[in-house]
Structure formats: structure tokens, C-alpha cells
Image (cartoon, helix red, strand yellow):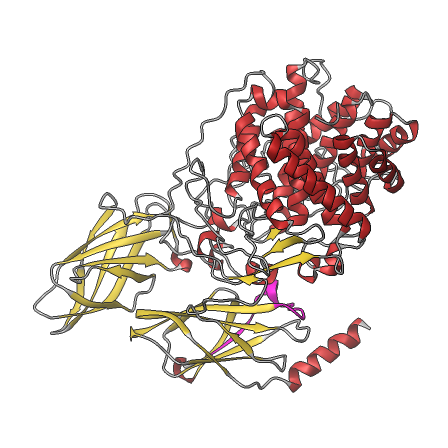
Amino acid sequence: MMRLLGSCVILLVGLWSVQADITVPVQNHWNGGFQAEVCFDITVELHSWTVTLKFDQPISSLDVYTAEIQETKDGGKTYVLTNKNWNKDEHVGDRLCIQMQGHGTGDINPTITASLSGQPGGGVVVTTTVKTAPPGQTLPTTTPRPFVLPSGDGEKATLTVNINNPDNFQGYFDFTVPENIFGWIINVTFNKPVKQMMNFEVGDVLSHSADNLNWVVVNRPEHVAYPAGSKLHLKFDAQYGGGGIAGSAVLINMGKDTLHVTPVPNTDNSKYNYNDVLYKSILFYEAQRSGKLPPNNRIPWRGDSALGDKGEAGEDLTGGWYDAGDHVKFNFPMAYSTAILTWGYLLYRDAYEAAGQTQWMLESIKWPLDYLLKCHVKPNELYVQVGDGGADHSYWGPPELMTMPRPSFKITASKPGSDIAMDTAAAFVTGYFAFKEKDPTYANTLLEHAKQLWDFGMNHKGKYSESVGAAAGFYPSNNFTDELCWGSIWLYQATKEAKYLTEAEKYLDDLPAWGMSWDDKTIVNQVLLYNITKKDKYKAAVEGSYKMWFPGGSIPYTPKGLAYRLQWGSLRYASNMAFAALLAADTGLHPEEYRRWAMCQIHYALGDTGFSYVIGFGSKYPLRPHHRASSCPNPPAKCGSQIMPMKEPSPHVLYGALVGGPGQNDDYTDDRSNYVNNEVACDYNAAFQGAVAALKSLYIRHEHPEQKGNAQCPFSSGSGGPGGVVG
């Protein structure tokens, strides 16, 4: 069947290989270049594609970030583009967008047409003059970080003139790069007005003064990086009034990270500085913020972004967290992460207080809670996603400069999502507990929304990813019974109403937990119900889960001791199960064994292998995470997908982020293009941070394995298997 389907696709591509061209508007143009974008709505399944661009004049070169240039024809007037390996598969309902920057002679403003082979439909015109969007889609407000052109303390060079004609000249500046550069601008000053600068090889004109004496040139994305000691050769052609020309220039490094983090003191004399990990993990969540940033924003390379996020009726959907290394707001993992983070705070307030992080933690969890409240617009309506994964993943740049439409998606009574309704309810209840003394009005608002969402999820059952197709390819729900249990447990803890406990016990899965994630709450449900009821069957369920997870069970281990559930985000699963083990130990279940196993899993991530998988922690850690914002230089230096495969470290340290983790043989490559092992995500850090807080709390209570002489790692179970959890 699969082979037949593949043959059909190939046949259709052949039948539709010639398409009517659509006109592509130029969004911006300047001396020496232009910018444009075309999008195609996908109407048939594609497993490869070709886009043909035709220009009415020769284009000397073309930068395309989401495609390969297969062929240039007609003297530079026709460019044939093909897919990259990562975007060869386009599905019905997707939108394929091609952003381009062209280069030519003079103030170039070409007429462009485009066609996509492989489907019968045309494209979607993209233009910067669009002021409205279809219902449920919004155009983000572009809010670049404040920028003032640096003045002259960079590397200096003097103009060398190759060719000098009466009205034009060719010249260059040569710079010896004094330090590693990742993103740059060059401030140029001439002794006479210059009408045009053009035909650069490594940059483009950004701006010039009204008198044409001062010009600013900015890097192209493919020429962003220069190592210390190398040469930056800025060659160009220019037009001027003649009579001889002289000039000087200053090279400014735009890749300097201005965030300087001093480690928090280790007050416990523990092997790893848990205080510092908590501090930096909170910083990571601040780096993920969307919307209007607060005055006390601590991440200088982040600014306001996605200020146009709206619902179908214009509801304000700004705020929340960007999911991972991208800029979609996926509420399923966001609500889960919020609940887990807040739960960890409720249990281990002593750890946050001792680390000096209480206020920062409360601000951290309130950010997504405020956003999730905005998303619950009616009792039976909940927005569950903002942004299109396909279009978003085609863009490599900072969120402040996004220009693609950001559609919003919701569940309703006719298009239900019990899973995400219950996850959001659980997040609201944890928030209720966190704020009920500090801000009772806010806390009660959270609880009322939680009750409404519980009713919504129970009365209109279904998987959200079957109602919202845009989420299905990214965060699909496998079932919703674990979320029905999860949400019910939290409502019971807040209200003590028996109906919630009845439903929680009804939907509990007492089989060994496959793992713990945004889509699987089995183990935490088991631990919570045991803590609430003390029933032996729930104790047995927890013990059964860890018998499977401990050495000798069915979960494989890496040679250095990591419980290895899955390649994609291997540390996520180990950290999540470590968090739940620490919770179980606090209920009295095998405390010494569970705590030591959990400690070994967390310490693996913190550096037991000689490498820390937490960015900015320890002496060796990832330098090239799959994360757009931290990989881009400070504006106005240019960013693009060309940066993804580069070997240079990202210009900004994404402090506190836990990367996906190693392979099954403890193998790991610090590669920005590897989103399986080297991406970061809000859900990766959530239970990990909670586990670190739990270990810190154990030190405060003098119950840590290191204090009890029981800290040997890798873990081996002495018995062959082990068998306060709310705030």
C-alpha cells in the first residue's frame, strides 16, 4: 500500500509539473538588493518539491533559507529551487513559505513570478502592506530589541581604491578580526558623498546618513562568523561625484553576549550546586517568554514579541512561553510544564527560599498562568495553540522579528479536547495553591476556571489533537484518560469534593508507567492517589512502575547509568521519572533507594559523565543548542537558516536549559541542527527543576543520599527492585 501511494504521488507530480505562475510582490528593496516571500498552500501530499522563480532582470545571487538552489538559468533570470531534507514532506493543510533575498545592480525592484510543481493550486501572495488576517490568524507585531548603532571602538580599516572612474569606484576595507565574531556591522565614513554602495560579497547596506557620508553595512547570514585572526574583506562598488575618494570604517562585533551570570553560592557543600541550577533554570524560562516583557526582564537579548497574537474574535492571546527552539505556543506541553513546575515549588518551597529564588519562581509560573487564563475565553472554549508549526519551523531568526501569520486554534464542545482541558485545569489548581495566600483573588480566579475546564473535559470527551489538526504533527495526544485522572486529583485536593476523587480513581491506570511526559501522567497519578488514599493497590502500582524502570527491569541503561527510555529527549524521561521517584520517597515508599536512583539520574545530567547537559552550568556544557533566539546575533546583524549547521557557538548562552541528551551509548554531539538530542524545551526543564529542588530540600532536611553515605552512582539496586505530595 505504501509503495502504491508513493507511485501515485510521483505520477501526480509529473502530471502537474507545469503550473501557472503567480506574481510575487517585493517586500523591500535597496541599492544592491531586495526581499520577497511567496507561500503555497499544500493541497496534495508531497514528498519532494520544486519551486521555479522567474525574474524580469538578471539576479546576481539569491539567498533562500528554506530551499536549495538546484539550477540557475537564463543568465540569472530563472532560479530552480528544491526542498531541503528536513522539509521535503509537505502535508495537506500545510503552508510552504519561501523567503528570499536577492542581489543585483542598483536599486533593484524586479518583477517576480513563482510556481510550485506537484500540486494544482497556486500560491499565496505575501506582502508587507497586509494589515488584516483571516479569522483566527494574526500577523505578529514586529518589535525588535532597541538598537543604537555602536560608535567607534571596534576594529578600524582604511579604504583601498582598486578602480577610480569619474563617477564611480571600486574599493575595499580589510579588517583583521580581533576576536571571534558572530554577527557584525561596519560603520563607513567617506570624505565625499557616495550615492550608492553595491555589489557586496559578504554584506548589504543597512542604512546611510542624509548627506551620504556615513554608511552602515550589515552581514549576510551566510557570512555571520569570523574567527579571531581571520580577515574580513569588504569589497564593493560605489557611485559618487568624482574627484577622488577616501574613507575609513569600523567593524563592530554584534555577537557579544551582554548577559553575565554569576553562580549562586553553594550553601550545602553538595557535589553539585543545586542553588545555581534552580537560578539558571528559571532564567531559561524567562528566555522563552512571549509577549510584552516586564520591566525586570533579565535576558538582554530578548525583547517584546508576538504582540499581535489573537483569537478568532480578536481575543488577546499574547504572553506564555515559546515551546522549545521554535516560536509556537503549544498549550498542551505548556500547561503540563506549568503544573509540574508549580507542584515542585509547592512541595519544596524550602529549597527555593534557601536558594533565594522564591520571588523569581512565582513570577516564572505566573507568566504562563496569565496566558492560559486568556486562552479560556468561555466555559466550553479554550485556545490551545498559537502559531503554525510548519511556517514557524521554516523561519530561523529571533521571535522579535517574526513576520509570518500566527493562526490560533481552539477546542469547543463540538471539537473537544479532554486532555488539554484537564491539563490546563491542573495547572490552574497548582497556581491556586501557590497564590492563595499571596493573592487570594487571583487564586480564586484560577480555581473557578479550573472547575469550568474540568466540567468541559468530562462532559465533552475527546483528544484535542483530533480536533486541532495543526497540533497533531507536533504534540499528538495518545489518550485522555490519564489527564482525566490528573485533573480530577488536583480538583479534589483543592475542593475535597468526593466526585473528583471518584473520577480520579475511576480513570487511574495502575499498570507500570511507560514514562512520564506531557502526554503521560500515569506515574504521578499513581503517586498522588497513593499519597491521598494510602491504598495498597496504588502503592503496588508505584512499585510496579519503578520495578520496570530500575536496573533489572525492562528499561535499558546507557553504559554510564542513564535510564534510557527513548532517543528523543532521553534526559527528559529520566529526569521526569526521577522527580516522581522523589515524590514517592516522600510518601514513605523506599526512600533510600528511590532517592539514590533519582539523584543518580539528575547527577548524570549535571556532570557525572564529565559533561553537563545543562547550558551554562559546570565547565563543559552544550554551546550550540537547537534554539533560534539564542543562536542569532544582536540586531541589526542578520540571522538565517545558514546559521543552523555552523560550528561556532551560539552568541548567547541559554542559561539553565536542559538539552535533549545522549544516545543509548552515552554518545552526544553538540550540533545545532540535531533537534533530537540538542534541542531544549519547556517540558524538558519542568520535572528536572522540580527534582533539583527536591534534592536541595533533602539537603536542608539532612536526608540527602550524600549526607547518608548512600550516594554511589551509577545506581544498582540492592534488592533487585523497589518495590507531602501536594503543597
x and y percent of residue 683 in the render?
A: 65, 42
Question: Is residue 194 at all visible to an observer of this figure?
Answer: yes
x and y percent of residue 151 in the render?
A: 23, 46
- Residue displayed at 57% across by 55% down: 315
Considering depth in this image, is 249 or 514 the residue closer to the camera? 514
584 is higher (above) or lower (below) than 481: above
Position of 547 with respect to 581 (left or right) is right
- Residue displayed at 57% across by 59% down: 393
Range shown magenta: 79-94
x and y percent of residue 718 in the render?
A: 83, 22
175 is higher (above) or lower (below) than 349: below
Position of 452 with respect to 97 (left or right) is right
Farthest residue in the front direction? 441
Residue 589, by quadrant, is top right
Residue 518, by quadrant, is top right
Question: Is residue 687 at all visible to an observer of this figure?
Answer: no
- Residue displayed at 37% across by 54% down: 637
Residue 357, by quadrant, is top right
* Residue 84 belongs to the span the image colors magenta: yes
Q: In which quarter of the image is the N terminus?
A: bottom right
Q: Quadrant of the C terminus?
A: top right
- For the image, the number of numbered tags is 0
* Residue 705 belongs to the span the image colors magenta: no
Considering depth in this image, is 202 or 305 the residue closer to the camera? 305
x and y percent of residue 374 in the render?
A: 59, 48
Farthest residue in the left direction? 243
376 is higher (above) or lower (below) than 76: above
